[in-house]
């Protein structure tokens, strides 16, 4: 059946055109329920065992944590609902899609928008939201009647919805409709822990009539303020020492610098990494204070404020350690600033003293509430943004009541920048010694603390596996096992796969060259190798060979999407989280010695003075002659008795790398490498028993230089082919304000930092050696000092398309 919709529209040139949209409706969209006598589906998704199939309403992003629980199976996701989630939140959509792709969970997408009997037209004066709600009710009604006629009569289609109006209309139509809490309480009796996961937005916890946050501005007001320059927009970064102190970067008097947001009222319910809009206070309200003082609260505390909220605002600060215990710090008495207002402050230990450091107070306006739909429910929108962020931590033992089945308790996140969260749980006594995961649901303006819900327990606090999982979750590292859909795309030969004659098509054979790899000890994913050979004209041919993963991973494969999601291989003390399945990462795409491997090769002709004559790029087949560690390669260089071709080649590569490195330094390159540590593990338990600093060898710099050269050559090649659409990356010149605190700190020592260019900064650091006492001295050109310095002052890297900037500016990228 073909459904058409025609309308007229006017283009920019004022020409009126007729637009016809065709919508095809079908009769062969099956219910996918096992035992259905009418539908002709080839394979069923929904089993015949449950008495009811759950159908989600238009807002499943509110209950994504709940439906991810293994107890939820045989769930019908309507096309209307799936499209709405895709529109509202891509991360939640990805999580829902993952559930749908898992055959064991039996989540079925029913295309109600293309079914003849479930598609509906939008009525006159009906809002899109009301039309979608009605479409959901029509689809559920069809499912209920269809199952009653063609499957077991007692099998129901049940709607789960926290929309009271939609539930009421569903019940009027004879549909079994329940709120999420009602359904879990009735149908999941054997799973009482699920009640903790259900977000109860009707709760009014932590209400304080003496304290109220300011209402956030309307979206139109915020957008207009940003456009007019009255508001500054940025990503909020909370201090690691005080969750009531935050900063964003913004233009102040024409200079980009940090803007401070200090105090509960000014932060106005914003949390770490929120995108916020802020408004500067008048200059006469700016305050100056030593950097050893952190202003915690600006407002006066009322005498009758509850004790647990007073502790972290005046008089005493609760400093949380990893074990969940509370350490007490004494707070200095109140001091008076220029405007005469008193406020408490807490001394930060080991903080350097900087005099006349200005701290700016600003009002926080949360950008999470901006939407093109001005009538959007702000509380719901806040939940949508924050339910994507889940926090690991522990329950405050002091907040647990002695005997209570369901109670409100405080949750402390391991990330000290997150305020404590209030949750309701029935498992307080069970969870008090465990690491748990909590999500924020809402933050009413009458509540001092955000309100959240329990998601899951990770395990006992202090357990190695539990703490490792906490670490991975806190850094958003995907650590789950690879899905069966990914593993199915691996070569069927497994580790027996070999390079065949057919693989040489379009590749050059470089197996006879003296190729070798240089990596850390124990490295199994060898992704690069090098070679050098003399040419008849006296120059050298140098090659960098990268494992050709593209032979196994094609665009848009499930494995490709999974690798893009993971981004990189993560190395922990005792294990690794692979970006690709180990068959590829540590075997078929690892350039092991004495086996044929597919590679992508960057080949240069280079003079004895390290001048590049030409460069070429080829797909290749290589056979590495040796897999060296950095130390083994260095020993080869230093041992003059070693005169084989591979060793002499490494020596020449090392001498050329030194020339390339010096040339970069002469152009103003800064050394930013961080000192690395190595953990020694116990053989049986794989527990770390010792730690030592890695000694950097010349061979470390050798590999680094040629990898940099390969990156530069590839970037130049891409830019030459795509001059207007190449991705460029750079660190912008740090503003002078970023150096102010450092210059004040080193000025008494007679050190002058020049930072007009990176070359000037590097030279001034090299020259800065100050004797402070006869038995020790400060050396600012120390590697660790330089690295920490640059990290503090340099802005975040920017990425632009080459067509977006002038030709004159491109060399700086």
Image (cartoon, rainbow, N blue to C red):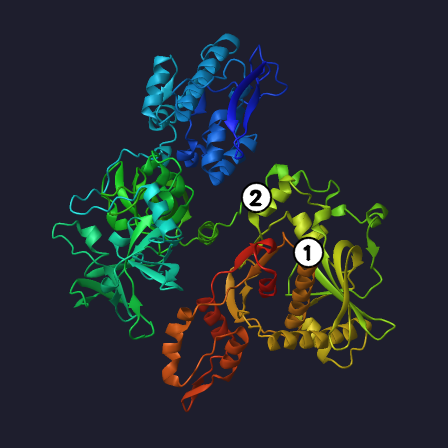
- Residue 182 lies, with reference to residue 715, above or below; the image says above
- Residue 695 lies, with reference to residue 434, above or below; the image says below
Name the quadrant of the C terminus. bottom right
- Residue 152 lies, with reference to residue 537, above or below; the image says above
- Residue 327 lies, with reference to residue 507, above or below; the image says below
Front residue of 310/320: it is: 310
Left or right, 758 with respect to 366, comes to: right
Q: Residue furthest front?
A: 14
Left or right, 729 with respect to 164, comes to: right
Say whether disc 2 or disc 1 marks the residue closer to the N-terminus: 2
Which circle marks residue 761 in the picture? none
Question: Circle 2 — which element?
Answer: loop
| Quarter of the image where one finds residue 140 | top left
Q: Residue furthest bottom?
A: 774
Where residue 805 sits: x, y (%)?
57, 57
Where residue 151 sits: x, y (%)?
52, 11
| Quarter of the image where one finds residue 720 | bottom right
Front residue of 708/147: it is: 708
Left or right, 64 with respect to 702, comes to: left
Front residue of 407/515: it is: 515
Q: Residue at x 40, y 42 (%)?
A: 385
Give the total number of marks visible in the rendering.
Answer: 2
Dot 2: few (<14), some (14–19), or many (≥20) neighbours within 10 Å? few
Where residue 146 sits: x, y (%)?
50, 11
Left or right, 644 with respect to 144, comes to: right
- Residue under label 1: 718
Find the distance from the CA under tag 2 to the CA under tag 1.
35 Å
- Residue under label 2: 481
Q: Residue furthest right?
A: 536
């Amino acid at each position: 059946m073909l459904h058409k919709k025609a309308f007229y529209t006017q283009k920019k040139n004022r020409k009126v055109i007729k637009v016809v949209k065709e919508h095809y409706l079908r009769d062969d969209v099956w219910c996918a329920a096992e035992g259905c006598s009418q539908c002709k589906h080839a394979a069923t998704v929904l089993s015949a065992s449950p008495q009811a199939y759950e159908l989600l309403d238009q807002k499943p992003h509110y209950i994504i944590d709940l439906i991810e629980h293994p107890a939820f199976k045989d769930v019908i996701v309507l096309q209307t609902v799936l499209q709405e989630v895709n529109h509202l939140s891509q991360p939640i959509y990805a999580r829902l899609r993952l559930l749908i792709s898992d055959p064991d969970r039996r989540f079925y997408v029913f295309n109600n928008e293309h079914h003849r009997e479930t598609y509906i037209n939008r009525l006159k004066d009906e809002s899109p939201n009301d039309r979608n709600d009605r479409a959901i009710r029509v689809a559920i009604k069809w499912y209920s009647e269809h199952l009653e006629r063609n499957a077991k009569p007692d099998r129901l289609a049940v709607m789960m919805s926290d929309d009271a109006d939609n539930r009421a209309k569903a019940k009027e139509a004879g549909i079994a409709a329940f709120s999420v809490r009602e359904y879990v309480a009735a149908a999941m009796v054997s799973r009482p822990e699920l009640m903790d996961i259900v977000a109860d937005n009707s709760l009014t916890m932590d209400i304080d009539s003496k304290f109220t946050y300011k209402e956030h501005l309307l979206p139109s007001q915020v957008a207009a303020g940003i456009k007019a320059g009255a508001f500054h927009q940025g990503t909020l970064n909370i201090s690691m020492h005080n969750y009531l102190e935050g900063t964003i970067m913004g233009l102040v008097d024409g200079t980009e610098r940090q803007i401070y947001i200090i105090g509960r009222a000014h932060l106005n319910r914003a949390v770490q990494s929120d995108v916020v809009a802020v408004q500067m206070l008048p200059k006469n309200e700016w305050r100056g204070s030593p950097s050893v003082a952190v202003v915690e609260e600006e407002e006066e505390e009322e005498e009758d404020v509850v004790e647990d909220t007073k502790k972290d605002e005046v008089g005493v600060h609760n400093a949380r350690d990893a074990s969940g215990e509370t350490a007490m710090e004494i707070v200095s008495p109140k001091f008076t600033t220029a405007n005469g207002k008193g406020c408490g402050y807490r001394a930060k230990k080991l903080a350097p003293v900087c005099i006349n450091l200005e701290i700016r107070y600003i009002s926080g306006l949360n950008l999470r509430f901006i939407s093109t739909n001005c009538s959007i429910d702000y509380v719901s929108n806040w939940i949508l943004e924050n339910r994507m962020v889940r926090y690991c931590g522990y329950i405050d033992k002091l907040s647990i009541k002695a005997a209570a089945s369901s109670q409100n308790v405080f949750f402390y996140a391991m990330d000290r920048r997150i305020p404590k969260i209030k949750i309701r749980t029935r498992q307080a006594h069970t969870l008090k010694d465990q690491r748990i995961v909590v999500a924020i649901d809402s933050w009413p303006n009458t509540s001092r603390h955000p309100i959240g819900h329990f998601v899951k327990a990770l395990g006992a606090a202090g357990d190695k596996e539990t703490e490792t999982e906490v670490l991975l979750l806190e850094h958003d590292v995907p650590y789950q096992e690879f899905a069966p859909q990914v593993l199915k795309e691996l070569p069927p030969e497994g580790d027996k796969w070999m390079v065949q004659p057919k693989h040489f098509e379009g590749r050059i054979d470089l197996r006879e060259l003296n190729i070798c790899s240089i990596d850390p000890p124990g490295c199994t994913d060898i992704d690069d190798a090098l070679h050098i050979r003399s040419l008849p004209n006296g120059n050298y041919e140098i090659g960098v060979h990268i494992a050709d993963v593209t032979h196994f991973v094609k665009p848009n494969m499930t494995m490709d999407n999974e690798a893009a999601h993971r981004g990189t291989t993560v190395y922990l003390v005792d294990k690794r989280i692979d970006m690709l399945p180990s068959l590829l990462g540590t075997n078929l795409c690892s350039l092991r010695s004495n086996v044929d491997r597919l590679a992508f090769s960057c080949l240069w002709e280079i003079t004895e003075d390290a001048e590049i004559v030409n460069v070429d790029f080829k797909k290749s087949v290589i056979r590495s002659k040796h897999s060296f560690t950095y130390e083994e390669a260095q020993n080869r260089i230093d041992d003059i008795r070693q005169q084989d071709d591979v060793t002499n080649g490494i020596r020449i590569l090392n001498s050329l790398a030194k020339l390339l490195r010096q040339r970069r330094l002469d152009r103003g390159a800064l050394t930013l490498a961080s000192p690395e540590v190595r953990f020694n593990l116990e053989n049986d338990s794989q527990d770390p028993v010792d730690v030592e600093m890695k000694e950097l060898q010349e061979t470390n710099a050798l590999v680094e230089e040629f990898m940099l050269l390969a990156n530069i050559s590839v970037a130049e090649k891409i830019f030459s082919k795509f001059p207007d659409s190449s991705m460029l990356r750079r660190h912008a010149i740090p503003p002078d304000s970023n150096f102010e605190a450092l210059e004040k700190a080193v000025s008494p020592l007679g050190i002058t930092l020049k930072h007009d260019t990176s070359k000037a900064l590097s030279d001034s650091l090299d020259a800065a050696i100050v004797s402070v006492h006869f038995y020790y001295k400060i050396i600012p050109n120390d590697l660790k000092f330089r690295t920490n310095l640059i990290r503090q002052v340099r802005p975040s890297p920017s990425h632009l398309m080459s067509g977006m900037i002038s030709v004159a500016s491109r060399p700086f990228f």
